[in-house]
């Protein structure tokens, strides 16, 4: 069973970056493994002012 992803954008930002840092080598790997829609995730975080950096493998 997969973890429940936080709804709050700032908690989501922290949670996703932790997963990217500790477990996944890319956002694609995270989304595939956790069954998360990448476009929706990026849109949700973009609304809070965050963008994904492929080079850094994190949202900033």
Image: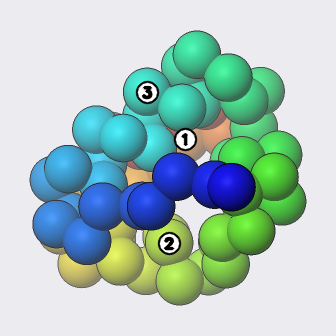
Which residue, as the protein is rendered here, is positioned at the far top?
Answer: 22
Q: SS at mark 1?
A: strand
Q: Residues within 10 Å of mark 2 (few under 14, many from 20)?
A: some
Number of dots carrying numbers? 3
Q: SS at mark 3?
A: helix
Q: In the drawing, does residue 42 fall left or right of residue 9?
A: right
Give the residue pinned by disc 3. 18
Q: In the drawing, does residue 15 fall left or right of residue 8?
A: right
Residue 6 position, x and y percent, is: 30, 61
| Above or below, comparing residue 31 to residue 48 in the picture | above
Q: SS at mark 2?
A: helix
Q: Nearer the viewer's eye, disc 1 or disc 2?
A: 2
Give the residue pinned by disc 1. 53
Is there any visible trace of residue 14 in the rendered image? Answer: yes
41 vs 35, nearest the viewer: 35
Give the residue pinned by disc 2. 41
Residue at 20%, 64% in the rendered image: 9
Q: Are marks 1 and 2 in contact (CB under 8 Å)?
A: no
Q: CA distance from mark 1 to mark 3?
A: 14 Å
| Above or below, comparing residue 19 to residue 15 in the picture | above
């Amino acid at each position: 069973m997969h973890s429940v992803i936080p709804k709050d954008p700032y908690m989501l930002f922290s949670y996703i970056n932790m997963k990217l840092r500790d477990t996944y080598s890319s956002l694609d790997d995270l989304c595939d493994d956790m069954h998360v829609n990448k476009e929706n995730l990026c849109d949700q975080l973009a609304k809070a002012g965050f963008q994904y950096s492929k080079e850094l493998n994190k949202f900033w």
